[in-house]
Amino acid sequence: MMTRRFIGRSLQALASLALGTSLWLNAASALAADAYPSRPIQLVHGFGAGGNADVVARLVAQKLGEALGQPVVVDIKSGAGGAIASANVAHAKPDGYTLIMLTGAHTVSGALRQNLPYDSVNDFAFISTVSSFPFVVAVKADHPAKNLADLIAMSKTKGVSFSSVGVGSTQHMVGELLAAESGGEFLHIPFRGGGAPALAVLSGDVDMLSDTLTVAAPHLQSGSLRALAVTSAETWPLTPAIAPAAKTLPDFEVRSWLGLAAPKGTPNAIVQDINQKLHAILAQEDTQKALAQVGSMAAPSTPEAMQAQIKSEIERWKTVADRRNIKVE
């Protein structure tokens, strides 16, 4: 009898100890979450220095670092239309210390690339879109095409080459959609990113640039490039002098975006905290002015809306890829 009582009391003591340990661990976990962030945060993007993703990532990094009380350090992992950066972040520890500035290219890669080492939707905790913007279709100032209709006519007789920041980028798909909608011949010449696509057009090696205003604006302002169209459905408020492509090709529209995400499994409390801080940052007048300087408009969203947008765009680019018989390994 004494032995049974001893065993029973021992089991009760062990159960109490286990419960206490569990409560302590939960409390420690909550304290750790409350302490976030306690060290610098890495913000990855997948395109060259000086491009749209880089400029906006550095703006957000500075502002977000101030809001979080820890440095946010931009880390470029360029290549494969942003897929290298996406893979890096998808496999990172989901603790809130690795974020990614995704671009519309994330959905293009999800549509075109057959062997991605990650799932474009399910391997990420989406936080919020940051900005929205169209692309500019432009040529060298002395190019014979004076407008988009001229360029399309030229593409049907001798073909037109166009540059982009890489296979699987949204810039790439702008050219492919032009070809699909116009019936012309557009030859894609990919570059790694940054200012290289514009330089190829300025040198006369490539006919057409389809890129962001971040890249194109300085050359448009200097007169070395001439804009033929902007890819928003209507006149873009920040470039009222540039005609929308839809005036030449009805219903033509490509508007891309930038947005923050983290690895799948990142605590929802962290996702929501960054979302709220980012919304506050995007509401600031100086942030909106800085975005306008690179042709973008602030476009905050919920995590759920960002995920839905990504799913929808993947399906759209799959359709374009099928029409143009584009396959990327």
Image (tube, grey):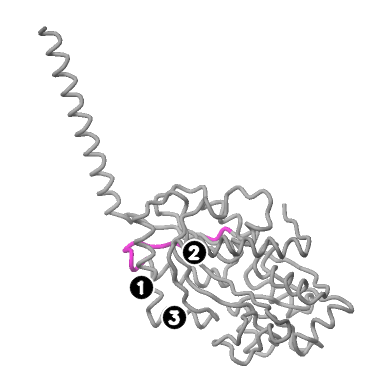
The span shown in magenta is 65-77
Mark 1 or mark 2, earlier in chain: 1
Q: Residues within 10 Å of mark 3 (few under 14, many from 20)?
A: some
What percent of the width, then of the height, locates residue 201?
Answer: 74, 78
Mark 2 or mark 3, earlier in chain: 3
Residue at position x 61%, y 76% in the image: 212
Location of residue 131 with respect to 82 vertically, above or below: below
- Of the pair 54 and 10, the residue shown nearer to us: 10
Q: Find disc 2 in the rendering and name its residue.
A: 306
The local secondary structure at tag 3 comes to helix
Location of residue 110 with respect to 216 vertically, above or below: above
- On whether residue 159 falls in the magenta region, the answer is no
Residue at position x 11%, y 7% in the image: 1
- Of the pair 58 and 133, the residue shown nearer to us: 133
Report the residue that reaches farthest toward the left.
2
* Label number found at residue 288: 3
- On whether residue 69 falls in the magenta region, the answer is yes
Mark 1 vs mark 2, CA separation in Å: 17 Å
Asked which quadrant contains residue 63, the reply is bottom left
Q: Find disc 1 in the rendering and name its residue.
A: 280
On the picture, is 221 further left or further right than 308?
right
Mark 3 vs mark 1, CA separation in Å: 11 Å
On the picture, is 67 further left or further right than 227?
left
> Can residue 225 be seen in the rendering of this structure?
no
The local secondary structure at tag 1 comes to helix
Q: Residues within 10 Å of mark 1 (few under 14, many from 20)?
A: some
Mark 3 or mark 1, earlier in chain: 1
- For badge 2, the amino acid type reads Met
Mark 2 vs mark 3, CA separation in Å: 20 Å
